[in-house]
């Protein structure tokens, strides 16, 4: 076989390989599909409770009534912090340092971050003469309803195969 015949055979083999490759890649797209899923609503929802406390005398203010109002607000924020801990968990960072096998530094930090929607103030009341308390309630069914109003979930309408 001459040189031009070998070149034609190689070109033919390369063409057949390329066509086969394109054909197989085209077939694989026939098995691709798009499915939209729907979330399943739980049967029961928990109700979370939290209590926050704040000292009245430690508040900044010129008179007793201003300090009391500030303590009421601070106790409400403390109750929201406790709810956030229950819903999202608490991040804890710890550090210890040793020198000559003696503990020289011991630090512990905690933080919580999250958004609480739908909580309800159950009661705000004084505890003793120097502390205010606020009780909050978070009904998770109400949280789910708020989620539905903002997320607009969709049901499976159809499955499309490509």
Image (tube, grey):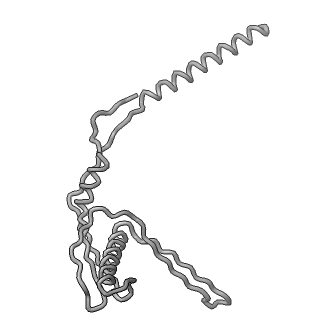
28 w.r.t. 82: above or below: above
**Which residue occupies 52% across, 26% down?**
25
**Which residue occupies 42% across, 72% down?**
90
Residue 143, by quadrant, is bottom left
**Which residue occupies 63% across, 91% down?**
102
Query: Residue 52, image x and y in percent?
Result: 31, 79
Q: How many marks?
A: 0
25 w.r.t. 77: above or below: above
14 w.r.t. 141: above or below: above
Q: Quadrant of the N terminus?
A: top right
Query: Residue 159, image x and y in percent?
Result: 32, 33
Q: Quadrant of the C terminus?
A: top left
**Which residue occupies 24% across, 56% down?**
42
Residue 132, by quadrant, is bottom left
Query: Residue 69, image x and y in percent?
Result: 30, 79
Query: Residue 161, image x and y in percent?
Result: 37, 29
Of 113 and 59, which appears nearest the observer? Answer: 59
Left or right position of 87 against 136: right
Extreme front residue here?
62
46 w.r.t. 97: above or below: above
Left or right position of 26 against 56: right
Of 71 and 81, which appears nearest the observer? Answer: 71
């Amino acid at each position: 076989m001459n040189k031009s015949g070998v070149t034609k055979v190689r070109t033919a083999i390369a063409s057949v390989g390329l066509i086969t490759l394109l054909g197989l890649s085209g077939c694989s797209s026939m098995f691709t599909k798009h499915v939209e899923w729907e979330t399943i609503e739980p049967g029961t929802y928990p109700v979370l409770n939290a209590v926050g406390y704040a000292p009245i005398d430690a508040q900044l203010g010129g008179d007793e009534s201003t300090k009391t109002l500030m303590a009421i607000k601070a106790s409400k924020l403390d109750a929201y912090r406790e709810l956030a801990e229950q819903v999202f968990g608490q991040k804890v960072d710890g550090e210890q340092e040793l020198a000559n096998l003696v503990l020289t530094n011991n630090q512990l930090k905690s933080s919580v971050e999250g958004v609480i929607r739908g909580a309800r103030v159950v009661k705000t009341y004084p505890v003793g003469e120097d502390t205010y308390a606020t009780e909050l309630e978070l009904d998770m069914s109400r949280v789910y309803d708020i989620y539905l109003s903002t997320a607009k979930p969709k049901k499976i309408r159809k499955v499309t195969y490509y």
